[in-house]
Amino acid sequence: MKEMNWNEMGFEFRETNGMFVAHYKDGAWDQGSMVKDSYLTISVGSTALHYGQQCFEGMKAYRAKDDRILLFRPQANAKRMRESAQRVLMPEVPEELFLRAVKETVLTNEEYIPPYGSGGTLYLRPFLIGVGHNIGVRPAPEYIFCVFCMPVGSYFKGGMRPVNFITTDYDRAAPQGTGQAKVGGNYAASLLSHNEAVSQGYADCIYLDPLTHTKIEEVGAANFFGITKQGEFITPQSPSILGSITKYSLLQIAEDIGLNAKEEDVFVDELHRFVEAGACGTAAVISPIGAICHKGKKTVFHSETEVGPLTKKLYDHLTGIQFGDVEDIHGWVVEVK
């Protein structure tokens, strides 16, 4: 295992032993292979550069207590990438190629997987881009599928604690747009609103539905959930929300621990119904929400300083499955051998 200061590690790019690269040309994917590089050479006319024809995924590899290497629901990442590719007219990456690329990347960089108990993981970034000589607004003549990785530390350095958010007047995605696809343009459009929220002292902004601005859609680059005093785990439902693998895992785990889990509209003027709230995604799993500010009105949930008991229970259960400490009754975990 690589000698590194795991406790000081954050979420940032690091050079590792190599990445997986496959090419699509003349209607077919090649086998792909590991390369010892962190650079790609592409045409200046690549559609990924000019027209945003690209998509990506985010996932992790975990070191279990018995030193096994585990992936969490990689088939779901493969499926979501295929759906994103369809939306921007790129060739789908077959599940077999996707999974093989991820596993080869993990094994090539096994020494960079943080040890069990450090809170760290090996973050994996699969992506698909349109390349080749082109200048018109049309699908690319060629494509590159790549998976690279880097070790990342625990998201909560000083322990898990709530953060506050503020709603924004900006829209994350248009109705019938690319909101459900994990494409780079959605994230580029979020940079300004994120900076404005941070400059006001908040962790990030909350996007409302673009048609009426009355319903919560996403929390920055993560999904929202709230827990009511009646034991309901509720997360927004909308055609412009990215289908978070973490969110759908939490929906199932909420049912497993006795909550009534459902997707439905979450109106921003009805936040008082929630006794706990959080944002969920690959990076943090769950970021507890202490309060939300909307049009000058601040709604505090469980606490601005302490994590709610059900939020903590959900977090512990999901991360327990990911690290192999909690029984995986749903068949989500895949061991890399």
Image (spheres, helix red, strand yellow):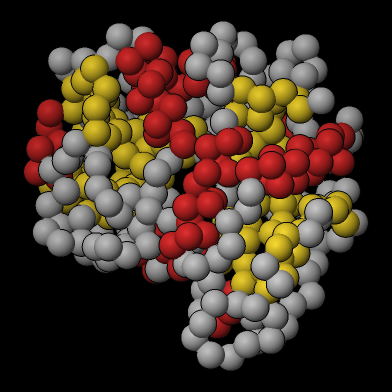
Q: Residue at x 67, y 46 (%)?
A: 98
Q: Quadrant of the N terminus?
A: top right
Q: Quadrant of residue 9?
A: top right
Q: Nearer the viewer, residue 184 or 293?
A: 184
Q: Residue at x 30, y 9 (%)?
A: 258
Can residue 111 be seen in the rendering of this structure? yes
Q: In screen coordinates, is 75 left or right of 304? A: right
* Coordinates of residue 155 in the picture (x, y in percent): 57, 36
Q: Residue at x 72, y 52 (%)?
A: 147
300 lies above or below 261: below
* Coordinates of residue 224 in the picture (x, y in percent): 32, 39
Q: Quadrant of the C terminus?
A: top right
Q: Nearer the viewer, residue 219 or 154?
A: 219
Given the current orientation, which residue lies at the most extreme front position?
27
Q: In screen coordinates, is 221 left or right of 8? A: left
Q: In screen coordinates, is 248 left or right of 156? A: left
Q: In screen coordinates, is 73 left or right of 292? A: right
Q: Quadrant of residue 213?
A: bottom left
96 lies above or below 37: above
